[in-house]
Image (spheres, grey):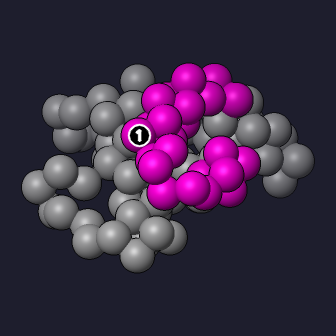
Amino acid sequence: MILIIRGKNKKQAETAKELLISRLQPLIDSEISSYNSYRVSDDVLSKISKKGILKALETYNTSKKYRFSVYASWLIRAEIHKFLGLPIDPEKV
């Protein structure tokens, strides 16, 4: 999947980002489901996850051999771990 989030103006670019985030909602839900034991609301974890997806959009390199969803899930977990104060394992994240 090649990601190009562009538009003629900022409004179109923001709409494209929102669309991508809404399409990746199942990925967000699956990632935050493993953090239920930390007693943080799903809404908060969802906002943190969206921050990870936006970071993935900015830094994803299409020449790598992994998919965007894998890269985004790594960054989602990294953002959640930062928020919860957990160590970030570089091999898993």
| Point 67% across, 51% down: residue | 41
- Residue 85 magenta-drawn? no
Q: Residue 42: x, y in percent?
A: 65, 45
Q: Is residue 33 left or right of residue 44?
A: left
Which residue in the rendered view is the most extreme toward the bottom? Answer: 85
Q: Is residue 58 visible?
A: no
Tally of numbered tags: 1
Q: Residue 80: x, y in percent?
A: 46, 59
**Label 1 secondary element:** helix
| Point 63% across, 24% down: residue | 23
Residue that badge 1 annotates: 34
Q: Which residues are magenta?
A: 22-45
- Residue 27 magenta-drawn? yes
Quarter the C terminus occupies: bottom left
Q: Nearer the viewer, residue 21 or 65?
A: 21
Q: Is residue 19 visible?
A: yes
User: How many residues crowd around disc 1 within 10 Å: few (fewer than 14), some, or many (20 or more)?
Assistant: few
Q: Does residue 85 sit above or below 1 in this rendering?
A: below
Q: Nearer the viewer, residue 63 or 29?
A: 29
| Point 39% across, 32% down: residue | 69
Which residue in the rendered view is the most extreme toward the left? Answer: 91
Q: Main secondary structure of the magenta part?
A: helix
Quarter the N terminus occupies: top left
Q: Amino acid at mark 1?
A: Ser
